[in-house]
Amino acid sequence: MDEKYLITPAPVSAPSKNFIGLEEEYAGFKKSKAVIVSVPYDKTTTYVHGAKNGPRAIIDASAYLELYDDELNQETYRIGIHTLPALEVENLPSEDMIKKVHASCAELLKSNKFPVMLGGEHSLSIGAVSALKESYANLSVLQLDAHNDLKNEYFGSRLNHGCVGRRISEMCPLVQAGTRSMSKEEKDFLAAQANGKARAFSVYDILEKPMWKDELVRNLTESVYVTIDLDVFDPSLVPAVGTPEPGGIGWYETLDLLREVAKDKKIVGFDVVELCPIEAQVASDFLAAKLVYRLLGYVFTNKK
Ligand SMILES: [Mn+2]
């Protein structure tokens, strides 16, 4: 075969530094309601490395999204979406990365901005949640993830991506969905939480309990931070993650859940994490970008 057919074509235009390629009119900080914070970090990754390239890939892919959202019949970008330069965290120890995320998030909340964090590995959520907790006393967290991440310590660190759920549950109520992989320690921790701070709706609940979504929403408080580990999706849909798990949920199921939560609760920020881009496999990057834009749409529907 002619060699040229084996080469991935380069994108036709240079990628924008702004999410969804927005022009300054809608991307300036002052007028923007939402702000994108990139956290290119993957120091505690345990399987496939490369999540530090996730934020860049999401922003690059977002340039190819339609500005008009055909599900919501609205042009969500009109709320203003500012894209900050990526946080300089790549070589920091986890605790310093988390401190930087906390500071950035707290700063945005002070300016009345809606924070959207792009990962990077999941531990960044600890910094975001701790900042939001200072502004919203009645905060709870919805975690979409294949993994419960409830280990007290993993590979010698309490701030490993496998511990993020556990750390969040120490700050506020935690509700998980789409989980399908845990250790015995995590199982025991969850079982001891009958009236406690962590609740998981596994893929088995989703498959077997028709009312799982209502129950999930009831377990959330009024203000909700959403953290989406992209491995919650089935790996046939999103193969570009560091720790793929078979049997994940689909695009429409995920949107149904997020739409419902956005309708009933006040979503006060979210993150999309663990994208570990695979060269020439842009479907994962594009899904992540579209998910960010759609979720912003749900949050700001009729609130333009
Ligand atoms: Mn995960």
Image: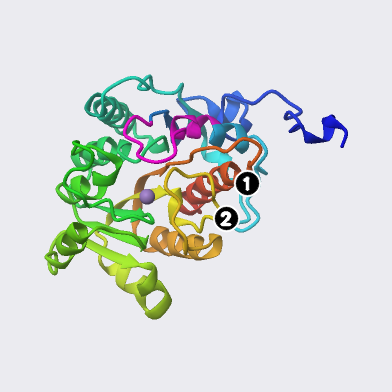
Tell me which amino acid carries mark 1. Answer: Ala
Q: Read off the residue under disc 2.
A: 237
SS for dot 2: loop
Q: Residue furthest right?
A: 2
Judge whether 100 appears above or below 69 on screen.
above
Tell me which amino acid carries mark 2. Answer: Leu
Judge whether 142 appears above or below 286 on screen.
below
Q: Can residue 235 be found in the magenta stretch? A: no
* 217 vs 101, nearest the viewer: 101
Q: Quadrant of residue 108?
A: top left
Q: Position of residue 169 (x, y in %)?
A: 18, 51
SS for dot 1: helix
Q: Residue furthest front?
A: 1
Q: Is residue 20 left or right of residue 141?
A: right
Q: Earlier in the sequence, mark 1 or mark 2?
A: 2
Give the colour scheme shown. rainbow
Q: Are marks 1 and 2 in contact (CB under 8 Å)?
A: yes
Q: Residue at x 18, y 43 (%)?
A: 153
- Please say whether residue 192 is visible from this viewpoint: yes
- Cβ of mark 2 under 8 A from ligand 1: no
| Number of residues whose C-alpha sits closer than 10 Å to that of mark 2, classed few (under 14), some (14–19) or many (20 or more) | some
Q: Is residue 231 left or right of residue 290?
A: left
Q: Quadrant of the N terminus?
A: top right
| Number of residues whose C-alpha sits closer than 10 Å to that of mark 1, classed few (under 14), some (14–19) or many (20 or more) | some
Q: Can residue 43 be found in the magenta stretch? A: yes
Q: Position of residue 56 (x, y in %)?
A: 53, 29
| Part of the protein shown in magenta | 42-56
Magenta: predominant secondary structure element?
loop
Q: Position of residue 49 (x, y in %)?
A: 44, 34
* 260 vs 113, nearest the viewer: 260
Q: CA distance from mark 1 to mark 2?
A: 8 Å
Say the numbered circle drawn on residue 283. Answer: 1
